[in-house]
Amino acid sequence: MRPTASFMFSHPAHWIALGFGAGLSPKAPGTVGTLWAWVSWWAFQSYFNAAELGLIIMISSLIGWWACKVTALNMGISDPGSIVWDEVVAFWLVLYLLMPASFSTQLMAFVLFRFFDAAKPGPVAWADQLFKGFGWRGAFGILFDDFVAAFCTLLCFALWKVW
C-alpha cells in the first residue's frame, strides 16, 4: 500500500510517522525523510539549546513509537518504507551527538547513515529482524534498526577521530 495525502491527514499518528509528508515520496522515502530531518535540524539549532534539543529527540522518539504503531497497523504492513519518522529521530540523534559539526561533517554523517540504514550491514540487519510484527514491539523495531544505524554512523566518526 502506498499511502496518500488523505491517508496521512486522516490521523495525527500518520502525519508524524510519514514525516510530515516526506514518506509520501514515490522514490527513496527514507532518504527524503533523512533530508527532512537534516533541514529541520538546521532550523531547530537556532531556537533551542543542547539540553532542549536532547529533550526534543527523546520526546520525538516516544511520540514516534506511538505514531509508528498506529500507522503500521492502519497500513497493514509491519514496517512500511513510507514510515520515515525512524530516520528522522535517528538522524537527529547523530547530528546532536556530533554538535557542533561543519556542513562537510554533517554531509558525511548523512551519507554514512543512509548507507547503514539502506544496506543494513551486520548489526543493522540483526536489529532489523529482532522486533517484527505489529503493536508496541513491532513499532519499537521500526525505530530500533535506525538507532543502530545511527550508532554505526557515530562509531565510524569515533574510529576516524581515534585513527
Image (cartoon, helix red, strand yellow):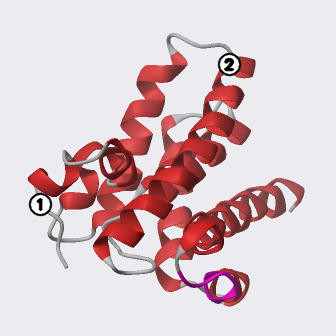
Label annotation for residue 52: 2
The secondary element bearing badge 1 is classed as loop
Identify which residue is drawn at 55% across, 63% down: 113
- Foreground: 154 or 69? 69
- Foreground: 145 or 6? 6
Identify which residue is drawn at 73% across, 40% down: 97
The secondary element bearing badge 2 is classed as helix
Name which of mark 1 and mark 2 comes first in the sequence.
1
Residue 7 drawn at (x, y percent): 17, 57
| Extreme-top residue of the structure | 47
Residue that carries the numbered disc 1 in the rendered image: 4
Circle 2 residues within 10 Å: few <14, some 14–19, many ≥20: few
39 to the left or right of 159: left
Q: Amino acid at mark 2?
A: Glu
Stretch in magenta: 128-133
Residue 111 drawn at (x, y percent): 48, 62
* Residue 23 location, quadrant: bottom left
Q: Amino acid at mark 1?
A: Thr
